[in-house]
Structure formats: C-alpha cells, structure tokens
Image (tube, rainbow, N blue to C red):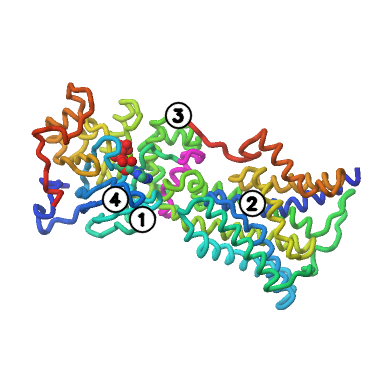
Amino acid sequence: MTTPSHPHAGDAERAPDAPPPMIEFRNLQVVYDDAIEAVRDVSLQAEKGALVALLGSNGAGKSTMLKAMSGILYAEEGKIDNGSIHLEGADISAFAPDEIVRRGVVHVPEGRRVFPALTVEENLQVGGFTTSASVLRERRDHAFELFPRLAERRDQIAGYMSGGEQQMLAIARGLMSGPRLLALDEPSLGLAPMIIDRIYEVILDLKKKLDLTVLLVEQNAARALEIADYGYILENGRIVLDGPADKLAKNEDVQEFYLGAGQSGAHKSMRDVKHYKRRKRWLS
Amino acid sequence: MRLFADLVASGIAIGAIYGLIAMGFAVIYKATGLANFAQGEMSMIVAYVAWTISTTLTGNVFVVVAGSIVFAVLLGLAVERFIMRPMLGEPIFSTVLVTIGVAVVLRSLITLVWDAYPHALNLGVGRDVVKMASVSLRGAQIASILTLLAVMGAFYLFFRFSKIGVAMRAVAADDRTALLMGVSAARIHAIAWGCSSAIAGIAGVLFALVYDLSPAMFQLGLKSFPASILGGLDSVIGSGFGGILIGVAENLAGGYVGSGLKDVAGFLMIIVILMVQPFGLFGEREIVRV
Ligand SMILES: Nc1ncnc2c1ncn2[C@@H]1O[C@H](COP(=O)(O)OP(=O)(O)OP(=O)(O)O)[C@@H](O)[C@H]1O
Ligand SMILES: [Mg+2]
C-alpha cells in the first residue's frame, strides 16, 4: 500500500478524502483516583498499516494511554477525564474491553502477563476468546508457524518459560483474536538483544503480511525508531516531540536524552534543554 | 470394625454433600476471588423450594429436581447481577460482608415464607436402605456420593476442555489480562454464580432427602467452608475431596470420641493440614519465575 507522505498529519493537513486514521487519540486526558493526572491533553494518531512508536521514560504515561484505548482504566480507578479515542473515526472511548477486542484492537500488556498456570495452547485459546472454534484452530496454526518455539512447547505451563518465550506467547496470544491494530507495551523489556531482534523482526513481518497497524510503546527509543514509521515522545503525560522515525532518530535532543548519545550521564528532561522549542500544535 | 465401616460410609455420604457445596464455594472463589458466605443458605432455600414443588405441584422426582435446579440457577444469577455486580471494584472486605448479609436475609426468608418446623422431603425415592457387604446406606446417600463424583468429573472436563472453563482459569490467574483478551468478566462471574448455586441446590435437595428440612440447614455451609479450604480454595475438584475428608473425620470423631468433637473436627483438621500445606491439599501454588 502507499503510505501517505505525512502519516502523522493533523486534521488540517489531511487530504479531505483520506480515510480516517486507524486509531486516533484526541486531546486525551486521563486521571487516576480522581487525583493523579497521568495523561494530559495528548493527541496522537496512527494511519492504517503504519508502525507508530510511543516513546518516553518511566511514568511518562505510555501504558496509561494503551489502557485508555483498551477500556481497562476502570479496573484501576482511572478514567478518561477529557478527550476521546477513535477507531477508524468511530468513538470507542466508552466501550467495554471485550467490545474493543471484537472491533479488532488488541493491547499486549507490559510485562507479558501470560497466564502462568495455563499451558501455551490454553493461553492462545484465551487470546481467541472472541473467535469461533474453527477460525481459532487456523490462527493457532499460524501462530505456531510464526513462533516455532511455541509449537514445540504447546503443552508446557506458560509460567515456567523463559522471558523471551513468554513475550512471544504474549504476542501470539494477542494475534488470536485477529486484530487490525496491535498495541505492544514494552515488548523488549528485560530481554537479551538477540531476542529483541527476533521479536522486532516478527513485528515488522506482521505489519507487512497482515497489513497490521502497530502501536509500539518503548523506553528503548533507539531500537524502536529503527523499525517505526513515525514516533511520538511522551513526557509527564504530554507529547513533547513527534515526527517521522528517521528524523526523530537524528534529532539532537532525542539523541542526547533518549538514545544515550549524551555525555552528561545524569538524566535530564527535555524541558531542561534551553533551546528546545516546544511544539505547540498539540496544545491548542 | 462394623462401627468403623458404618461411620466411614455415612461420613463419605455426608461428606459428599459438604463436597458439593464446597465446590460451589470454590467455583465462585476461583472466578471472582470472593468467598461467598451465603453458600449454605442458598442450598437451604433451594431445598425448601423443592419441598414446595413436591407438596403443591407434583412429587415426581424428575420434575422436582429439574425445577429446583432451574430455581437455583436463577437465584445465583440474580444474586450476581443485582447484588454482587454493583459491588465490583469495592474492597474485598465489604464485598464479603455483603455475602454475609445475603446469607442472613436468605436465612430469615425461611421462617417468613415457610415455617420453623422440620419437614420431610418425600419424593418416594432415596429412603430405602441398601446393604452392601457390611455397611448399609440409604439410597439418597448413595446418590449423593455418585452426584459428587459426577460433578467432579464434569468440572474436570469443563476446566480442561471448554472455552469458558479455560477462560475462567485465566480470569482466576489474572483478571486484568483476561479483560484485554476480550473475556467478559461479567459473563464469567454470572456463569460461576449460576453453576455454584446449582450445585449447592442439588446438595441441599440431597441433604433434605436423607435428613429432612429444617431452618438450621444453612449450617451445611459452615461445614463446607473448611472443606473448601482443606482442598484449596481455588481448587474446585480438591474442594470435593475436602468435603469427603471432613465428613469422614467428623463422623469418626463423633463416633469414637464424643459428639462434642463432631462439629469441630473439621476445623481441627484444617488447622493441622494448613500448617503443613498452606495452600490446602490441592490448591495451586503461585508460579513465580524470575
Ligand atoms: N493504577 C494507577 N493508579 C494511580 N496512578 C497510576 C496508576 N497507574 C499509573 N499511575 C501513574 O500514572 C503515571 C503514568 O504511568 P504509566 O504506567 O502510564 O507510565 P509509563 O509511561 O507506562 O511508564 P513505564 O515506562 O514505567 O511503564 C505515573 O505517574 C504513575 O505513577
Ligand atoms: Mg508502562
């Protein structure tokens, strides 16, 4: 497919006849316990078939955005205070989690979260809860093709597998409902570089073969920007920078603070950069 | 020796009833993380409804049993939908207190709707004594044991092979992630309450067939709770075995030591066993892998 030249473009810059983005966060604001503002006025979008990276350090609000999208904020006393989330133009902000999965949005949570006492195959079965039995079998075979390692261990208890295997299982499980949008929360967390390579390879492959839209949340900006089309950098619940992945990767500030090129050692915030001009377009 | 065999046999029979109620307990605990202290009361109400059907409509055993199961399922679904679901997200402590409230209400319903006298549930079956080798049991006692085995087998298959059963285990392990997979927690909870109430109801009817109805029947719940803890609160099948153990233990204690010990034998047993096996005999240990 042809990617739009500006996959990130806001409404004003979009061609009038362009299809709505696969997912769009509009001025999202999320509050926990009616007190903690975890996400403040964030707008973000991913075009169909794009791989969009959402980057930021601990506590930036990345996971909160995904939880808002998949409808599970209520389980943590969180709620969308303002703004909305749109799937291909349709407002899904108030949908129940199972309805969101049925509509083709799957969120693979941080820390893999495989069901530890269930076998590999049972984990996949739960991933396909919204799917009919015959389609389920097909998708399971496809998952085993994608991750032959899982096929070898299909009857093994998931909790005893290695971190890399668990991450593969978490992704495979997420694919069982046949999503169009796959959101991955820190899939590289705690894994060896070789395993990360393998997982990123699969993500790229999925994007191409299944025409999947991918929302990739990472702290590891360097790795993520290698495979992403577009990136957003989130800090303290706000987008501080966004742009095409290659441009972001070359950006000096990004290099210094997220790609580890800086010499200072101490972690500073983007806000501390004197010459850094905040982009105002999202704040309107 | 005869006494011993008799005590064990009737212990297994009453234990089967405890086991059924305990399994109901475990199903709700597994799916919702909640201890439902109204389990014994639900058994009792269903048994009274069975009695009402038998005295007003028909004494046909199949109709009475089918009618009570339907009532039990509806009761479970109603409690889940109108009482427990609005409590979702509230602290566990308050939610468990609410089940105790439900228990008290159901208990007082017995004297309000029915009366405080014992009644025999007469369906024309189950009262005859069957002699096997040196022990003799009533038909309904044998039926209790067979029912327990059948329900245990059914649950084994349900949790291993059915989509809902596997999803219920997933919810038990990690309900947030189950939500992310599109498993509707509300549906799983409703199914758990419906199943649990149905088996508690069956247990109540069986008990009434053997020992008559009385407003004190809710105490079955007090015997079944230790059975469930013993088997492992989250182990449905283990809870069934736990029931048998409690039944036999209390019968032996009552027969050989004195009736004073009969009622506490179960609790003594949990204390000893939990000291050795903190998750119960069949409870799932948390799988921790770092
Ligand atoms: N359940 C919760 N209740 C209250 N506050 C929360 C909750 N979850 C997150 N927060 C707060 O919201 C902010 C954003 O958290 P979030 O988990 O979204 O960050 P993150 O970008 O995913 O960080 P990390 O990279 O460490 O996963 C943090 O300040 C966090 O303390
Ligand atoms: Mg996070």
Figure check: A278 above or below B225:
above
* Residue at 43 percent of width and 36 percent of height: A151
Comparing B88 with A205, the one in front is B88
Q: Residue furthest front?
A: A35
* Residue at 25 percent of width and 51 percent of height: A29
Q: Which amino acid type corresponds to the residue marked 3 in the rendered image?
A: Val
In this rendering, would A159 be left or right of A72?
right
**CA–CA distance between discs 4 and 1?**
24 Å
Question: Which stretch appears magenta?
Answer: A115-132
Ligand 2 falls in quadrant: top left
In x, y percent, where is residue B135?
Answer: 87, 50
Instruction: Say which mark, if any, is on residue A102.
Output: 1
Looking at the rendered image, the disc whose residue lies closer to the viewer, 3 or 1, is 3
Instruction: Say which mark, if any, is on residue A30.
Output: 4
Element on which disc 2 rests: helix
Q: Which amino acid type corresponds to the residue marked 4 in the rendered image?
A: Val
